[in-house]
Amino acid sequence: MNKLNVAIIGSGNIGTDLMIKVLRNSQYLNMSVMVGIDPESDGLARARRMGVATTHEGVDGLIAMAEFEHIDIVFDATSANAHIKNDAALRHVKPGIKLIDLTPAAIGPYCVPVVNLEQNLAQNNVNMVTCGGQATIPVVAAVSQVATVHYAEIIASISSKSAGPGTRANIDEFTETTSQAIETVGGAKKGKAIIILNPAEPPLMMRDTVHVLCDSNDQAKVRASIEEMVSAVQSYVPGYRMKQDVQFEVIEKDAPLTLPGYGKFSGLKVSVFIEVEGAAHYLPAYAGNLDIMTCAAMATAERMAQSRLNQ
């Protein structure tokens, strides 16, 4: 079967886990180059052991490699600031190259595979939002499909041990990017995101809480839409699951909620509690926050490659 060649920029935890996923599980992608900036990094050493070409000279090193001529898709698992520079450098040499951005830079449109991947197949740069966004926006979108969502708030709780330098450097971008994507992809009129780095030992698995305020009198329809969406996410993130049944609370008109930046609300409050267990390809199972990003990025690239190969 023909495959498209891919490179990964960023030889840290996310990049290395993604590389292993591509090597083990991909139908349409060929792992060609791993790019880093630290010649002693474990990710580059592991790539070499697995027969993948490497460079420790960053994006400039990638462009200088003979393999670059045949690269179709580049994953960027660095940082928001680095991605802006990487995109400009790559596009200067190869304007039509596809970039899948795992940072909060958001040069291209937000992409949550189960919600809007098909609309973004032709884009040359797509942004994978954040781990919290990938875990929670499908739930918000599921409610939006059957009711008007006035407000959606997500709380992503991850183990402190699973938050590396890149995550910590991008905390502000995390909340801003996720909040925007809750609205633009999830369909909420107003979105809010909160992240918690939990220092508990032993490390806790990723947990996500989603609160949605919507107009609906049909709880069964809302529940069915959420359950169908959760099942769809599980097709590419096997460790994704609800921890309990969908919870409902009716907010009466004579006792409305007052939301800062929104005003008074009455209607239906929907609460969903998600757990994400990692596949432990490279990262510990508790690092579901990193696993869901690599799973979503690979699902996006797989579908893009399938679309191009079938043309």
Image: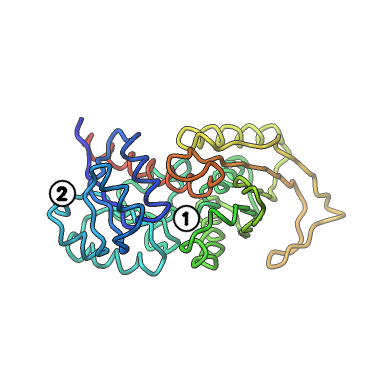
Q: Secondary structure at mark 2?
A: helix
Residue 190 seen in render = no
Q: Residue at x 69, y 32 (%)?
A: 220
Q: Residue furthest front?
A: 40
Which residue position holds label 1? 129
From the viewer's side, name the closer residue of 251 and 66. Answer: 66
**Nearer the camera: disc 2 or disc 1:** 2
Which residue is located at x 38 percent, y 46 percent?
Answer: 18
Query: Which percent across, then down, holds residue 48?
Result: 25, 48
Residue 55 coordinates in the image, percent (x, y) = 23, 58
User: Residue reaching furthest top?
Assistant: 1
Q: Amino acid at mark 1?
A: Val
Residue under numbered circle 2: 70
Q: In the picture provided, is 146 more to the left or to the right than 113?
A: right
| Residue type, mark 2 in image | His
- Between 45 and 141, the one lying in front of the other is 45
Where does the N terminus fall, quadrant-wise?
top left
Residue 299: quarter of image: top left
How are the colours assigned in the image? rainbow
Residue at 67 percent of width and 43 percent of height: 273
Identify which residue is drawn at 47% across, 55% down: 129
Checking the image for residue 188, the label placed there is none
**Callout 2–callout 1 Cβ contact below 8 Å:** no
* Nearer the observer, 23 or 251: 23
Alpha carbon separation for disc pair 2 and 1: 27 Å
Label 1: which secondary element: loop
Q: Is residue 225 left or right of residue 71?
A: right
**Residue 27 is drawn in which quadrant?**
top left
Q: Tell me the quadrant of the picture where the C terminus can be found.
A: top left
